[in-house]
Image (tube, rainbow, N blue to C red):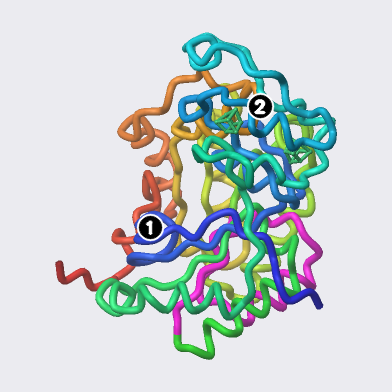
Amino acid sequence: MKNQVLVSDIQKFAANDGPGFRTLVFLKGCPLQCTWCHNPETKASTPEIYWKSRLCVQCGACLEVCPNNAILPPTPPHVARSKDSTYHKIVRDRCDGCMACVDACQYDALTVAGKSITVDEILDEVEKDRPFYNNSGGGLTLSGGEPTFHADFAMQILKSAKERGIHVCLDTNGFCEWEVLRKMVETVDIVLFDLKHMDSAIHKQYTGVGNEKILDNLRRLLEIGADTWVRIPVIPGFNDSKAFHECASEFLSNIKGQISRVDLLPFHNWCQDKYRWLGIDWALKDTEAIEPSFLEIPADIYREKGLVTTVGGSGFENTGSAVGW
Ligand code: SF4
Ligand code: SF4
């Protein structure tokens, strides 16, 4: 088993990804390619370069060191930085990821998304937040990308966290072999399980894969009694219709077993910068965020069918968590 994995970020004090305050560990690499992905840097399982045009002074130092002619020559900074600029500094399909340009940049305009890190390094970082877990009922949430994509390594993280007495959530898109998920579930306290669309053809069109395996894994999770929070990212033009919510709530209320709660997660576009830094023209960049209060009406569709439902997925709702401050 490899002893390091690529982590794109370790985020502190998250309040919407499991009970209480949590430390989110984002593993890099995902078998799905969701159009709306809020963490585009976690899709690929290799390090990627962020280029931040605002910080770039167009000095050309990166150009000098690139062995693959993958960096375009300097252009006047006001052109590169202008709001409507389509200037991309890096020709990504020529880049082999040597990172010589990142080392050469003195202005932090080039950085790397994805850092190789060991299980102990991850857990040592997570441990720093233990006082916040103790006060809020929080812990570690292993996310991505997709944790099951790195099954052996993810298991090591989960086991080590449990050995240290840390509450653990697994945030998964559910697209994996059942045996992989079953083994992980034995180790975690709560599974945060994404549900995206009930129609497999539409699911495939927007994520790259059908939903059969995902729905089957959800059924199996509930059959074995896993504490499961179903999370539905609500995306304009994809699954924001009344028909979708009626279909999804019908499915979830009739599934055998007890779903602990359903979280409707409103689409937002705060990740636009990350797409820009990666040189990706994001199809949803001009799509307006959904005002969370608008989701209270669809949330009632789920509630009417007996499903505990939140908008936004706060870790301080319906969890019984003690928040003393
Ligand atoms: S070295 Fe950094 S600041 Fe200079 S041109 Fe390259 S990215 Fe821009
Ligand atoms: S990572 Fe290497 S190949 Fe890619 S643009 Fe930078 S210097 Fe060139």
Name which residue lies at 65% across and 27% down.
Answer: 279
Residue 313 covered by magenta stretch: no
Q: Secondary structure at mark 1?
A: strand
Give the percent coordinates (x, y) of residue 228. 53, 65
Q: Which mark is residue 96?
A: none
Q: Along the horizontal axis of the image, is 297 left or right of 105?
A: left
Residue in the foreground of this view, choosing between 281 and 100: 100
Which quadrant does the N terminus fall into? bottom right
Name which residue lies at 51% across and 25% down.
Answer: 57
As drawn, the residue found furthest toward the left would be 325
Region rendered in magenta: 166-193
- Residue under pointer 1: 14
Name which residue lies at 65% across and 76% down.
Answer: 224
Name which residue lies at 55% across and 72% down.
Answer: 122
Q: Secondary structure at mark 2?
A: loop
Residue in the foreground of this view, choosing between 37 and 242: 37
The 10 Å Cα crowd at callout 2, few under 14, some 14 to 19, many 20 or more, is few
Give the amino acid at mark 1: Ala
Which of the two discs, 1 and 2, labels the residue nearer the N terminus? 1
Task: Determine whether the beta carbon of the residue marked 1 sits less than 8 angstroms from the nearest atom of ligand 2.
Answer: no
Where 204 falls versus 183 (above or below)? Answer: above
Task: Determine whether the beta carbon of the residue marked 2 sits less than 8 angstroms from the nearest atom of ligand 2.
Answer: no
